[in-house]
Amino acid sequence: MRSGFCLLAGALLATGLLSSGPGRTQTVLSYHGHPDRSGNFIVPSLSWDKARTLHEDDGFRARVSGHVYAQPLFWLAPGSNQGMLLLATEDNIVHAVAASNGHDIWRRALGKPVPRASLSCGNINPLGVTGTPVIDAAAATLYVAAAVETESGPRHLVFALSLKDGATVAGWPVDVAAALAKQRIDFVVRDQGQRSALTILDGKLYVPFGGHFGDCGQYRGFVVGISQSDPRVVSSWATRARGGGIWAPGGLSSDGKSLFAATGNTLGAVNWSDGEAVVRLAPDLRHSTDTSDFFAPVDWHALDVRDADLGGTNPLPWDIRGANGIQNLILALGKDRKAYLLDRNRLGGIGGALVTDTVAESAILGAPAAYPTQDGVSVVFAAPGAHCPSATRGSGITVLKIRSGSPPAMTTAWCGAVRGLGSPIVTTTDGRANPIVWTVGAEGDNRLHGFRADTGEPLVTVPTAITGVRHFQTLIATPDHLYVAADGGISGFAF
């Protein structure tokens, strides 16, 4: 049986990440590198042997202001030989630093961050930029969503900044609540939290919203779409019930045609009202109630009561070529410890998963990553696996192997020992060869770990702990470095 990772290749081409050979420089334009959130980075020089030489780069020093939850991005302007790292912080500062040494290129203040006292609940203080920004390569523009304290109270403002110097693009920022109020849509600013990554599709910027830690107030799962060419044109979708936040760090995923959101627990819903679900949204944010356009577990109400969000991770779409053709699939991973494998063309409605299995011993949170294997696809996530070999029970990361079939087969391939809750990525030298799983033991050992993705063999653990790395934090890969962001700075690792 011959298998392929069709969607990944398309996404790599679309984002400029598919290298044609050594020397082709990657850019990292969005969370986990691609709109599908696969987290698969092609680094031609990073073989298994080279990974064993990974070390902290003493010549790289990047200092930033504030707590950091967002992933850094990497940009190389056409004709330039100096790459740029971009990072936004809870101090509402966007930093652009040289990827070679960490020196400042520019920085932009977006306004005063929101103090915890201005919110009904939450665990981030102050609250500024939490969700990972996104880059439009053609326009050389960075889009970033910030919580800003004003004289009239907190506001959610969406900025467009020139990558050249950080200047605000004309017509921006967009005040989300004010734009929705013109359409008579209620958006309670102090109760809505923005911690999920931003997405671009078909000339629109998409900003997902949930609530704050503590599930207080009148928040809903919201997606706000803003036209890049005319930011006065704003559309939206929201859950019918209170709650149902979109809060996973990966935010929305896309297969290039649709957007997919995973929602959390709704509050007080008697009938299913868009919570605990995978929801398909059209680019104009239309959503139908047809069972082909949503999935929710049969026990959605029990998950609501237990706060066992399906939305603790972003949905992960991919294609597998099998004996009967190409299967369009999507995987959802929940705080209920389960994996739900869905038909992407017919999500199945309530209880309509192709495969459901308890795959973890604890809640699955953060962002998964995916990579092709000889006869299917593997998905790695942060949680101790429920079916790990005895020698690795209780390990911090788990890899599922999924093969084409009717129904598809889903088994645990291996588990790796990591203490902490970072979101993994994968590097390969050409999209398939030398696959390596990388993760940081966030709020655990705070060290960077690398494993052979085919066997789980540990390749390297960098001995230096990264001070201030926050839970769910992920890393990025460029042609000659791995970078991890943490409170106050970015760490660079050379190979």
Image (cartoon, rainbow, N blue to C red):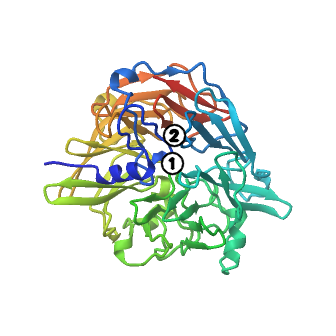
Q: Residue furthest bottom?
A: 184
CA distance separating discs 1 and 2: 9 Å
Left/right of residue 116 with respect to residue 139 in the rendered view? right
Where 475 falls versus 3 (above or below)? Answer: above
| First of labels 1, 2 by sequence position | 1
Toward the viewer: 217 or 440? 440
Q: Which residue is mark 1?
A: 31
Q: Is residue 443 visible?
A: no
- For the residue carrying disc 1, how many other residues have a C-alpha within 10 Å: few (<14), some (14-19), or many (20+)? many
Amino acid type at image mark 1: Tyr
Q: Secondary structure at mark 2?
A: loop
Q: Point out residue 305 in the picture as x, y percentages from the top left corner.
A: 51, 63
In the structure shown, which secondary structural element does the residue marked by tag 1 occupy? helix
Residue 475: where, in percent of width, then height?
51, 37
Query: Could you say which quadrant of the image residue 370 lies in?
Result: top left
Which residue bears the numbered disc 2?
A: 474
Tell me the tag on residue 128: none
